[in-house]
């Protein structure tokens, strides 16, 4: 009799009041926009054989600032209670890795 109740508990529907935070979804969107914008800047720079000018360089710095902003938003949304952490976690990973990549690329560009 006890195993039947246990099996019934495992297969029953579990409803929670956890939701995806809007700020986490927005931060993930910002991270994707930053990466797509950076890929477009790389394509523009390769088409001009590395002589694209200051606007492409400023676009790269804007990508870094955008990723920094997205990382701060995702971190703030991860600190909230009673949320589903999927989108804030994805946003933190995308924005964090792209920030590190942009920073390393900026440092390597200044060294050469």
Image (cartoon, rainbow, N blue to C red):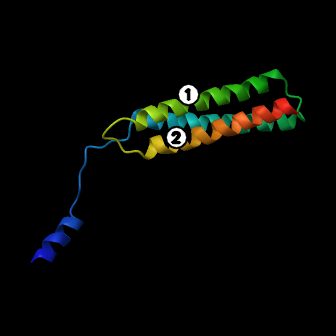
Element assignment for label 1: helix
Residue at horizontal 86 percent and vertical 36 percent from the top? 47
x, y (%) of residue 94? Answer: 58, 42
Tell me the quarter of the picture where residue 84 sits.
top left
Q: CA distance from mark 2 to mark 1?
A: 11 Å
**Would you say residue 35 is visible in this rendering?**
no
**Would you say residue 79 is visible in this rendering?**
yes
Of label 2 and label 1, which has the lower sequence position? 1
Residue at horizontal 44 percent and vertical 32 percent from the top? 76
x, y (%) of residue 91? Answer: 52, 40
- Say whether marks 2 and 1 touch (CB < 8 Å): no
Residue at horizontal 64 percent and vertical 39 percent from the top? 98
x, y (%) of residue 71? Answer: 54, 34
Tell me the quarter of the picture where residue 32 sits.
top right
Residue at horizontal 81 percent and vertical 21 percent from the top? 54
Q: Quadrant of the N terminus?
A: bottom left
Q: Measured along the vertical axis of the image, is residue 28 above or below residue 63?
A: below
For mark 1, what is the residue?
Answer: 69
x, y (%) of residue 35? Answer: 65, 38
Q: Measured along the vertical axis of the image, is residue 32 above or below residue 61?
A: below
Give left or right: position of 1 versus 64.
Answer: left
Tell me the quarter of the picture where residue 104 sits.
top right
Q: Measured along the vertical axis of the image, is residue 86 above or below residue 27?
A: below
For mark 2, what is the residue?
Answer: 91
Give left or right: position of 79 versus 92.
Answer: left
Q: Quadrant of the C terminus?
A: top right
Element assignment for label 2: helix
Is 93 in front, or is 29? 93
Give left or right: position of 17 versus 40.
Answer: left
């Amino acid at each position: 009799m006890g195993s039947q109740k246990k099996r019934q508990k495992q297969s029953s529907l579990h409803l929670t009041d956890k939701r995806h935070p809007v700020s986490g979804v927005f931060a993930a969107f910002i991270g994707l926009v930053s990466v797509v914008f950076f890929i477009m800047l790389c394509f523009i720079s390769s088409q001009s054989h590395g002589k694209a000018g200051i606007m492409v360089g400023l676009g790269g710095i804007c990508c870094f600032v955008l990723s920094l902003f997205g990382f701060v938003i995702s971190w703030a949304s991860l600190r909230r209670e009673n949320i589903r952490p999927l989108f804030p976690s994805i946003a933190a990973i995308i924005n964090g890795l792209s920030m590190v990549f942009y920073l390393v690329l900026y440092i390597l560009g200044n060294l050469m």
